[in-house]
Amino acid sequence: MKTIGVLGGMSWESTQAYYRALNEGVNARLGGLHSARIILNSVDFHEIEQCQQSGQWDRTADILIDAARSLEAAGADFLLLATNTMHKVAPQLQAASDLPLIHIADCTAERLCEDGIRRVGLLGTRFTMSEAFYRERMQSHFGLDVLVPDAADQNEIHRVIYEELCLGKLVDSSREHYLAAIDRLHARGAEAVILGCTEIGLLVSQQDTTVPLFDTTALHAQKAVELALETK
């Protein structure tokens, strides 16, 4: 079994979900008392968030590169960046590390394509929804048509992530707002909706809506388990 190097803490609420999913995934495949081999470097999200808000993305890249190098030195075989938003600096991270990086947008897009989805809605932080690094990767590499909510919905979705979900607060009114935003994307032609922030799956699940949901945390962890257990 390969060792998974997890860059976590963004936020630690969703990193918990990754840890559980990775271990459950390995145990489902191997049975018994098997669990995943994981090395975790959990960064201080306060520092990352301050850099995000001030546009210091190069600084966030430096923090994650240092963390990735520590994982490599500790014996990780590949990297899992346990956040959607910080894939904005995935190119810098990959260029600075010799370890393979499982890109969260790629494994999500692959599953969408497997399921025959061509037009999809995207929920996430404002950075993920409004900037090009995530949507354009899905469009150019996989031919997906990616729809995002309007500005008002983006603002509320972003607020809930940082002011509630990253702090472990699950608020019913916020869930209703998310579900309404999902319905609006569906009405615009989205065949499914990506839960494109690793905390959103803590608030909204498939049982809450008939619109197909693709939880990036779950898909990312599944891909990592597959790679960890590859025998070739």
Image: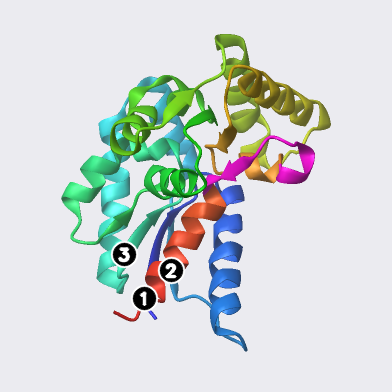
Residue for badge 1: 230
In the picture of the structure, the residue carrying the numbered disc 3 is 78
Q: Which of marks 1 and 3 is in front?
A: 1
Q: How crowded is mark 3: few (under 14 residues within 10 Å), some or many (20 or more)?
A: many
Q: What residue type is labelled 1?
A: Glu
Q: Residue at position x 60%, y 76% from top? A: 28
**Is residue 45 left or right of 78 when viewed as pictured?**
right
Report crowding for label 2: few under 14, some 14 to 19, many 20 or more residues within 10 A (C-alpha). some
Residue at the spot 42% in from the left edge and 50% down from the top edge? 107
Residue 96, horizontal then vertical, whole percent: 17, 50
Residue 58 higher or lower than 8, as above or below = above
Depicted 181 relative to depicted 87: above or below: above
Residue type at the position of mark 3: Phe
Q: Is 184 situated above or below 176? A: above
Q: What element carries label 2?
A: helix
Q: In which quarter of the image is the N terminus?
A: bottom left
Q: Residue furthest right?
A: 172
Q: Mark 2 belongs to which amino acid?
A: Glu
Residue 140's image quarter? top left
Question: What colour-coding does the image apply?
Answer: rainbow
Residue 177 part of the magenta-drawn span: no
- What residue range appears in magenta? 205-216
Q: Position of residue 146 (x, y in %)?
A: 45, 26
Is 212 inside the magenta-drawn segment? yes
The disc label shown at residue 226, or none: 2
Element class at badge 1: loop
Residue 136 position in % (x across, y down): 33, 28
The numbered mark, 1 or 3, whose residue comes first in the sequence reads: 3
